[in-house]
Every structure is written in C-alpha cells, then in structure tokens.
Amino acid sequence: MGAGFVGIVSIDVHLPDSHSLKEKRKDVLSLKADLQRRFAAAVAEVDYHELWQRSLLTASLVDRHAHDLEVRLDDVARFVLARHEAASVRHHLILAPEEL
C-alpha cells in the first residue's frame, strides 16, 4: 500500500505596493488564504517578517501520485506568479514519506 507523496514549493514574493508591515500582512494573509482554499495547501510565511515589501512563503501539498503532485505544485507557483509578477520560485521538491 502506497503512502503518497509530499510536495513543497517556496516562493519569494515581492510586494512593491506595500508601504507598511500592516499592508504586507493584509496581502500575505489574503494570498495564504487563497492558496489554502484553492489548492488545499498548508502555507506559512517563513522569512522576511520584518520587511515591508518582501515575503518568503512555503506551501506544502500531499497527493497519492507524484505526477499529480507535480502538476498541483506547478499550479500553485503559476497562481502566485500571475498575482505577483515580481515573485520567483525558490525551491520545488517532492518526497516520498520514507525520504522525510
């Protein structure tokens, strides 16, 4: 019986219209909620907490098949890049549970 796969994508997001930490938090919370709702992703802001115009988000997904997970991770990245043109994908990784 297969245990499935875990996928992780980290995306560096640039928020040029943010002029305070309060504005940044609003944008980041909105993006995290959209990723959770749309892709069933677990999402966390993992770096640049003190910067107004930058955030590093890491999202993780789980799927039974590695190929399906690859497609979903690509969809997450495309969604963020479409919403934030200055964003860039930093890491993209798929692991079987025994590799964790």
Image: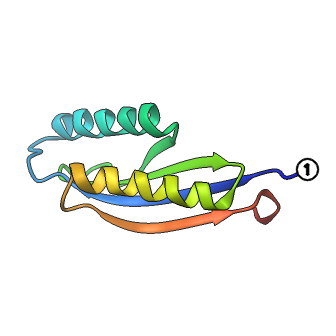
Side of 10 relative to 100 (left or right): left
Q: Which residue is mark 1?
A: 1
Quadrant in which the C terminus is drawn = bottom right
Seen at 34% across and 56% down, the residue is: 78
Depth order, front residue of 2/91 = 2
Between 19 and 42, the residue placed more toward the observer is 42
Q: Please, what is the three-letter code of the amino acid marked with disc 1?
A: Met
> Residue, x 12% and y 45% (percent of image)?
18
Looking at this rendering, what residue extends furthest in the right direction?
A: 1
Foreground of the two, 89 or 15: 89
Position of residue 39 in the picture relative to residue 2 (left or right)? left
Which secondary structure lies at badge 1? loop
Q: How is the image coloured?
A: rainbow
Q: Nearer the viewer, residue 2 or 89?
A: 2
Check the image and report above or below for 67 versus 24.
below
Q: In the rendering, at what x and y percent does residue 61 appear?
A: 58, 47
Q: Position of residue 92 (x, y in %)?
A: 50, 66
Residue 31 lies in quadrant = top left
